[in-house]
Image (cartoon, grey):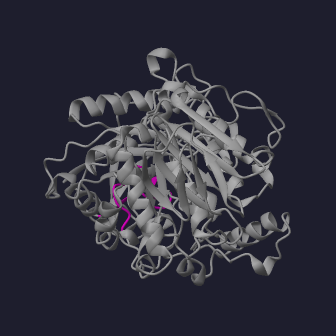
């Protein structure tokens, strides 16, 4: 026998738990409004509200038959962790690696991904950041349409598979970050509205009604989300969480949900004696996200910075559409501004938004911003899912990597970036509802038709070939030119660790010189210079002092006193 309990304030008269085809009544909990509980045998189970259909547990730890099936208990204490001495590591000073379990390997499982961890150790990264792993319909998907926020997608390996992966990563000295989605649930398999006011029409998001963080009933909804977050950190020994699109967490309460969540995570970190952390994806350009709670902030450890990506993307590719517009006017100036200020938009005009945007970032805390050349969004949200390495010479990609990996930010790579993977990373789904599948297909085509794409040119998200094209090809890292680029990434990550000035998070200590027309740029990092030539012809780049050591170079490089001659699409790291 075990105790079953559920928050179901929408139930008018009766709540039952169904186990092995037999129903067992639950009783209202006198001490908790809207809660029901009772004893029943252990086994796969579902709840019935007022004689309604069987529904999965909102706090289900496992959905062995998919999001719509019955729930299954999980005894987290039964897993035998081999790495019992893992004490974690803090985020500052680290390099992250974003990974999608389903396309990292052909098998698309946690166990298969674990077999490739030695590659990440040799690369030199510190954390693996897993894209969302909550259950979603079908087998393949990005994970952002997940439901059952306490469970793990079964095709990946379920709860045991995730624990084996985390255990294997910790054995190799790698931390694990998990991407979680609190701003919405997927359109299929979401049964929360049947139970209670998990959503509200008080606010609206791109996905419809907002998650209820400030309307009646929101105390329990907050506890539901916080409980899920703590379960990943506690039961699965995850080291940190990446919070998807926190700007879509509509909350007008005096204590914002993120502030409450960060406080709960800090408490767990103290009691477990591990450095746990939260990373936000935010479109707000607000330093409040990572400011300490005692200073009026929300207390998160770090946040993604799309500004650096946009500036680098424009400088490397010349693209200027959409939100790239402001960065593309003077792309090297945009790179310089972002490297020295943190945010490009810090209160000034944003033409894409048609208004002022952002506010200045505190210069001493560059490590609180994640910097990157590529992410799942910036690749997969393109019509063809083409990586930046597809249309650029390796030297230009190497230059972008150098600017990220010697930046004052916390660097992050996207899987396969380190060898310039030729495989795309496209938008793919596996919706089991034909109507939803067609709506997603047509919506994707309409979106890109506005940018001049023909319908037949846009990959069909539901087509199995779309996900197969997105799987990494692990024969590439040993081939030319991929092997050379991989060696460059390994060298840069090692330099960042060996030479602290290249990872100094103080934005005020960074100086950048550039020539917009000649297409060269040099970043001053203490005694080091990162010089890049993005032009089509050779350029002489001033260093400000005589170069004493050529630390690393990709492409044609000839130091000459207080300058360095760089061939087209070349980069050098020098010590003066």
* Residue 50 appears in view: no
The residue shown at (48%, 44%) is 547
Q: In the figure, residue 224 lies in which quadrant?
A: top left
* Residue 171 appears in view: yes
Residue 265 higher or lower than 444, as above or below: above
Residue range corresponding to the magenta coloring: 44-64
The residue shown at (67%, 69%) is 436
x%, y% of residue 214?
58, 29
The residue shown at (71%, 63%) is 537
x%, y% of residue 446?
81, 67
Q: In the figure, residue 200 lies in which quadrant?
A: top right
User: Is residue 63 shown in magenta?
Assistant: yes
x%, y% of residue 346?
69, 29
In front here: 72 or 524? 524
Residue 505 higher or lower than 69, as above or below: above
In this picture, residue 510 sits left or right of residue 442? left
In front here: 558 or 18? 558
x%, y% of residue 137?
52, 68
Q: Quadrant of the N terminus?
A: bottom left
Query: Which residue in the rendered view is the most extreme toward the front?
Result: 561
Q: In the figure, residue 490 lies in which quadrant?
A: bottom left
In this picture, residue 523 sits left or right of residue 160? right
How many dots with numbers?
A: 0
Q: Main secondary structure of the magenta part?
A: loop
User: Is residue 555 shown in magenta?
Assistant: no
The residue shown at (34%, 48%) is 232
In this picture, residue 359 sits left or right of residue 420? right
């Amino acid at each position: 026998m075990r105790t079953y309990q559920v928050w179901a304030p929408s139930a008018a008269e009766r709540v039952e738990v169904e186990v092995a085809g037999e129903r067992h009544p639950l009783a209202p909990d006198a001490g908790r409004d809207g809660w029901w509980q009772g004893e029943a045998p252990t086994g796969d189970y579902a709840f019935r509200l007022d004689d309604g259909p069987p529904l999965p547990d909102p706090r289900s730890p496992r959905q062995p038959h998919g999001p719509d099936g019955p729930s299954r208990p999980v005894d987290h204490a039964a897993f035998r962790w081999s790495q019992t001495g893992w004490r974690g590591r803090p985020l500052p000073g680290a390099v992250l690696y974003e990974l999608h379990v389903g396309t990292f390997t052909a098998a698309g499982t946690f166990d298969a991904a674990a077999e490739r961890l030695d590659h990440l150790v040799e690369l030199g990264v510190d954390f693996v950041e897993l894209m969302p792993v909550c259950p979603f319909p079908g087998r393949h998907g990005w994970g952002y349409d997940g439901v059952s926020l306490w469970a793990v997608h079964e095709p990946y390996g379920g709860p045991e598979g995730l624990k084996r992966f985390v255990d294997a990563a910790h054995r190799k000295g790698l931390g694990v970050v998990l991407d979680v989605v609190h701003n919405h649930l997927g359109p299929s398999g979401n049964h929360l509205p049947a139970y209670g006011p998990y959503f509200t029409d008080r606010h609206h998001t791109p996905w419809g009604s907002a998650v209820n963080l400030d309307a009646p009933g929101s105390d329990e909804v907050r506890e539901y989300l916080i409980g899920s977050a703590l379960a990943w950190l506690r039961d699965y020994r995850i080291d940190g969480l990446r919070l998807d699109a926190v700007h879509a967490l509509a909350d007008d309460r005096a204590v914002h949900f993120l502030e409450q969540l960060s406080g709960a995570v800090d408490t767990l970190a103290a009691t477990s004696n591990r450095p746990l952390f939260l990373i936000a994806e935010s479109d707000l350009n607000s330093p409040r996200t990572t400011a300490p709670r005692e200073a009026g902030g929300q207390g998160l450890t770090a946040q993604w910075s799309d500004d650096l990506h946009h500036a680098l993307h424009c400088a490397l590719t010349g693209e200027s559409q959409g939100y790239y517009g402001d960065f593309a006017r003077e792309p090297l100036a945009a790179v310089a501004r972002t490297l020295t200020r943190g945010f490009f938009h810090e209160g000034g005009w944003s033409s894409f938004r048609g208004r002022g945007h952002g506010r200045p970032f505190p210069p001493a805390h560059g490590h609180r911003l994640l910097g990157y050349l590529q992410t799942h969004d910036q690749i997969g949200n393109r019509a063809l899912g083409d990586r930046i390495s597809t249309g650029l010479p390796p030297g230009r990609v190497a230059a972008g990597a150098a600017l990220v990996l010697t930046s004052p930010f916390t660097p992050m790579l996207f899987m396969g970036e380190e060898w310039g993977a030729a495989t795309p990373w496209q938008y793919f789904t596996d919706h089991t509802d034909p109507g939803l599948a067609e709506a997603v297909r047509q919506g994707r085509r309409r979106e890109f038709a506005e940018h001049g794409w023909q319908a037949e040119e846009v990959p069909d998200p539901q087509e199995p070939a779309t996900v197969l094209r997105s799987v990494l090809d692990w024969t590439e890292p040993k081939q030319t030119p991929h092997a050379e680029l991989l060696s460059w990434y390994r060298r840069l990550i090692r330099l960042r660790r060996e030479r602290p000035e290249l990872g100094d998070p103080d934005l005020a200590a960074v100086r950048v010189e550039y020539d917009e027309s000649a297409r060269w740029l040099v970043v001053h990092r203490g005694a080091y210079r990162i010089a890049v030539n993005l032009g089509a012809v050779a350029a002489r780049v001033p260093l400000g002092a005589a170069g004493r050591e050529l630390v690393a170079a990709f492409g044609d490089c000839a130091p000459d006193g207080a300058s360095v001659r760089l061939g087209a699409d070349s980069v050098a790291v020098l010590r003066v």
